[in-house]
């Protein structure tokens, strides 16, 4: 597992002399931003997947496992393609579909999240 340490602090080798894990150092001033980015990527995506799983089960009567192949493909694409992994109406800037999606989310708190993602990708 890769580790990240602070340039101004003790080296990785000093802290973990027996480990050969890959490691990187960042400036101490960037520590809070680094942590925030990890929290957003991990927790925010987790919240979205939990929403999908819950709606699969409660609204559509589908098992959450039905979404696992999609999650696995998405993860593989993101690892392999990086910035070009985004697909769908946000990537295509398909306003008609985006408007339909906004309508489908009426009364759902996740409409605010969808709207925000539309704004930051457009």
Image: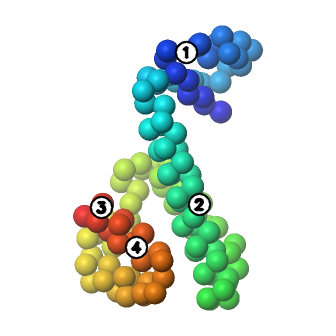
Residue 76 visible somewhere in the drawing: no
- Element assignment for label 4: helix
Give me the disc on residue 46. 2
Position in image of residue 8 (x %, y %): 49, 15
Earlier sequence position, callout 1 versus callout 2: 1
Mark nearer the viewer, 2 or 4: 4
Q: Which residue is mark 1?
A: 9
Disc 2 element: helix
* Label 1 vs 4, first from the N-terminus: 1
Return the x and y of residue 33 as percentages of the image width and height. 44, 38
Q: Nearer the viewer, mark 1 or mark 2?
A: 1
Q: CA–CA distance between discs 2 and 4?
A: 17 Å
Which residue position holds label 3?
121
Mark 1 or mark 3, whichever is nearer to me: 1
Asked if the residues shown at circle 1 and circle 2 are in contact, with their CB atoms under 8 angstroms apart, the answer is no
Q: Which numbered disc, 1 or 3, marks the residue that appears first in the sequence?
A: 1
Contact between marks 2 and 4 (CB within 8 A): the answer is: no
First-in-chain label (2 vs 3): 2
Residue density around tag 3, few if under 14, some if 14–19, many if 20 or more, within 10 Å: few
| Callout 1 touching callout 3 (CB < 8 Å) | no
What is the spatial separation of the Cα atoms under label 2 and label 3, in whole angstroms?
Answer: 20 Å
Of the numbered discs in the image, which one, if any, rests on residue 112?
4
| Disc marking residue 19 | none
Separation of marks 1 and 3 at Cα, in angstroms: 37 Å
Q: Residue at x 47, y 75 (%)?
A: 110
- Give the position of the C terminus as an image quadrant: bottom left
């Amino acid at each position: 597992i890769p580790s990240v340490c602070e340039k101004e602090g003790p080296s990785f080798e000093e802290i973990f002399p027996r480990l050969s894990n890959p490691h990187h150092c960042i400036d101490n001033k960037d520590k809070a931003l680094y942590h925030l980015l990890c929290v957003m990527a991990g927790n925010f995506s987790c919240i979205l997947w939990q929403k999908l799983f819950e709606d699969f089960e409660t609204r559509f009567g589908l098992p959450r496992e039905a979404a696992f192949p999609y999650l696995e493909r998405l993860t593989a694409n993101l690892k392999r393609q990086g910035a070009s992994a985004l697909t769908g109406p946000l990537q295509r800037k398909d306003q008609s579909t985006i408007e339909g999606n906004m309508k489908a989310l009426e009364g759902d708190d996740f409409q605010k999240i969808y709207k925000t993602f539309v704004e930051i990708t457009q």
